[in-house]
Amino acid sequence: MYTVYAIYNKSASKIYIGQTINLEVRLNLHNSKTFKGYTSRFDGEWQLIYSETVGTRQEALKREKQLKSYQGRLFVKKFTPRSDVAQR
């Protein structure tokens, strides 16, 4: 089973969408800045705001791509904390 997830960094007002086989480990990697790339550029804690489970990696990659589209990002933004959404 794979998990497609969205995490949010309140201090940077950024959302990251990804997929993994172990969500708990991946979230720890993002927050410890061990997971190099986009999320390591920003200070602050990344919090899980959305996740869903799919059966295969191929399905996870397809769903990740959908969530990264314009409509997908609008969907994910609904899960950010209310105070942050009002500021945009």
Image (cartoon, helix red, strand yellow):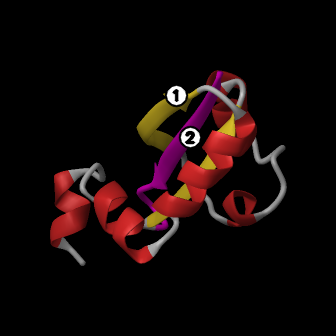
The answer to which of marks 2 and 1 sits earlier in the sequence is 2
> Which of the labelled discs sits on residue 53, or is there none?
1
Image point 70% across, 24% down: which residue?
22
Image point 73% across, 37% down: which residue?
57
> Which of the labelled discs sits on residue 88, or is there none?
none
Labels 2 & 1 near each other (Cβ < 8 A): yes
Q: Secondary structure at mark 2?
A: strand
Can residue 84 be seen in this snapshot?
yes
Q: CA distance from mark 2 to mark 1?
A: 6 Å
**Residue 78 placed where, x, y %?**
24, 56
Magenta segment range? Answer: 1-12
**Residue 51 placed where, x, y %?**
46, 36
Image point 59% across, 32% down: which residue?
3
3 sits left or right of 7 in the view: right
Q: Quadrant of the C terminus?
A: bottom left
For badge 1, the amino acid type reads Thr
Q: Which residue is mark 2?
A: 4
Q: Secondary structure at mark 1?
A: strand
**Residue 38 placed where, x, y %?**
71, 65
Image point 49% across, 48% down: which residue?
6
Residue 73's place in the image compared with 33, above or below, is below
